[in-house]
Amino acid sequence: MTRRKKTRSLADKVTIRTGKRKDYKKWRHENPDQVTSSRRFTQKKRQQRKLQAARKLARQEQGASIAIHPEPASEQSATTREEHDE
């Protein structure tokens, strides 16, 4: 007969459980309409999104502009080559 492994967790042994994480997860899964994010979390996320948008704008402004439909003039191609050589 093999020995049973000792467990520190009483979660599987206890039949009545109140206010425990598993109970809350089960309730949250069964009632998704009643679950809302905390005000602190939503404010934090809103602030993060603002920062992310500001960083994205900064990156876009910092980046070099590319002529998508360049003019067929030979002068423009000469200036772009000089800029890349620097």
Image (spheres, rainbow, N blue to C red):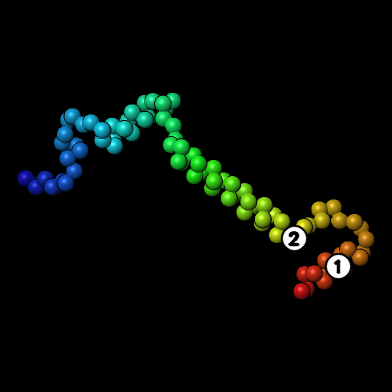
Q: Nearer the viewer, residue 60 or 74?
A: 60
Q: Is residue 6 above or below residue 82?
A: above
Q: Nearer the viewer, residue 78 or 46?
A: 46
Dot label at residue 64 = 2
Q: Where residue 76 sits in the image (x, y, percent)?
A: 88, 63
Question: Which element carries disc 1, helix, strand or loop?
Answer: helix
Look at mark 1 in the image and give the residue it sits on.
79
Location of the N terminus by quadrant is top left
Q: Do the residues bearing badges 1 and 2 touch, measured as CB atoms within 8 Å?
A: no
Q: Is residue 33 left or right of residue 11?
A: right
Say what amino acid the circle numbered 1 marks: Thr
Q: Where residue 44 sits in the image (x, y, percent)?
A: 49, 44
Q: Is residue 35 left or right of residue 20?
A: right
Q: Nearer the viewer, residue 29 or 53?
A: 53
Q: Identify which residue is drawn at 71% across, 56% down.
A: 61
Q: Identify which residue is drawn at 41% across, 26% down.
A: 34
